[in-house]
Amino acid sequence: MGAEPDRKLSLRREHLVVGVIWLLGLASLASILVLQGRLDQRRRAQLAVSSLRVQVGMLPKLALDLNGGLTQAQVQAELDSARQQIMTTAASLDSLSGNRSDSRLIRRDARPLFTLLTRANAVASAGHLRAATVQLGLALLPGAPGYRLNEAFDAVGVKYGREASSARRLADAGTVSAIVLLLVAFSIVLRRGSRLAREKHLLLEQSRLDALTDELTGLSNRRKLFADLELLMESKDAETAVIAVLDLDGFKAYNDRFGHPAGDALLARIGRELGAAVGGGGTAYRMGGDEFCVIARGAGAEATLDRARAALTERDAPGISCSLGSARVRADGSNADELLRKADERLYDDKRLSRGERIFAA
């Protein structure tokens, strides 16, 4: 009674465990997507910083008008355009880095540099290229605008590299975790499916056995007898096989005297004894009521039937004996019905003979 509730509780627990593992696996996959997105943003941020370095590196050449042919106003216009582009690139770091401090730092350090570039442009335009070059060179000394801007680039670049590496490690760990969790969940589901398949197979097998087994005695039933006879008649064992029908004499009187429960107990007991008596020499069946059947095989078939008759003669229940009629499988019939009819005829001959002996003895 308690097995089924325990089984249902176990299944519910398995469902819960599998559900939790699936959720953890899906959460790991979601975190991987987040980390991959973060990794992609940090790499793009690194590319933006590299682009800013290139843009800033081209500014001194522009301010000094080394290509020649531009007026001071035209150079200043180019510087203003470059300034706007650099500020726009720096502003893109806000979404890529997840904070505004990096872009503010770069924009803050870029403003003095552009002021210096404007002055250098004016000096170069006045014909003092050497002085303008020296002025821009001094901008790269420690503490100067160019130096501070490069420091800002270095700081945010290192930070983005560190964050990208961390995101990659976490994503790799999350990938492994997700795979492990999903594999565990899948293995549990697979194991449960295999177990349910086995249970279903066992239930089907048990149903098949129940359909071929007599519930009271545990012997094979009439359906199994006909199936076995069909197989037997097609095999070479049929040459030596004998089928016998056995009927209890005096069972009705015993049943009327002691009641049906006692009668069922008697049938169950002698059914077990019949199965044990037949053993490996054949197969015992209960046809229904107090009628049994035995298929005996091999050279010892007759001895097997003698043991079967003895098993159904109840020594502890006075008045219970056994009548038996047999037929040889190959010689006495071409099908199961003919064999059973022949064995029944001989059974009733045996019953009449037994009654005559009892009357004569009386």
Image (cartoon, grey):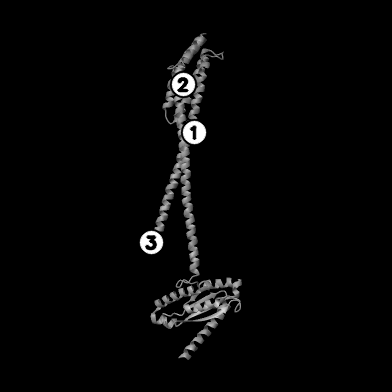
In this view, the residue farthest toward the top is 127
Question: Which residue in the structure is indicated by mark 3?
Answer: 2
Front-most of residues 357 and 93: 357
Q: Residue at x 39, y 56 (%)?
A: 9
The answer for how far apart the CA atoms under marks 3 and 1 are is: 57 Å
- Badge 3 crowding class, 10 Å Cα cut-off, few under 14, some 14 to 19, many 20 or more, is few
Front-most of residues 201 and 231: 231
- Badge 1 crowding class, 10 Å Cα cut-off, few under 14, some 14 to 19, many 20 or more, is some
**Which of pointers 3 and 2 lies earlier in the amino acid sequence?**
3
* Amino acid tagged 3: Gly
Residue 56 in the image: state x and y as whole percent.
Answer: 50, 20
* Amino acid tagged 2: Asn
Name the quarter where the C terminus is drawn: bottom left
Q: Secondary structure at mark 2?
A: helix
Question: Which residue in the structure is indicated by mark 2?
Answer: 150
Q: Residue at x 43, y 26 (%)?
A: 102
| Quadrant housing residue 326 | bottom right
**Which of pointers 3 and 1 lies earlier in the amino acid sequence?**
3
In contact (CB < 8 Å): disc 3 and disc 2: no
| Quadrant housing residue 270 | bottom left
Residue 281 in the image: state x and y as whole percent.
Answer: 53, 73
Residue 88 in the image: state x and y as whole percent.
Answer: 47, 25
Front-most of residues 21 and 317: 317
The answer for how far apart the CA atoms under marks 3 and 2 are is: 77 Å
* Amino acid tagged 1: Asp
Badge nearest the viewer, 3 or 1: 3
| Residue 234 visible in the shown view | no
User: Which of the numbered marks, if any, corresponds to residue 322?
Assistant: none
In contact (CB < 8 Å): disc 3 and disc 1: no
Question: Which residue in the structure is indicated by mark 1?
Answer: 40
Q: Residue at x 49, y 52 (%)?
A: 190
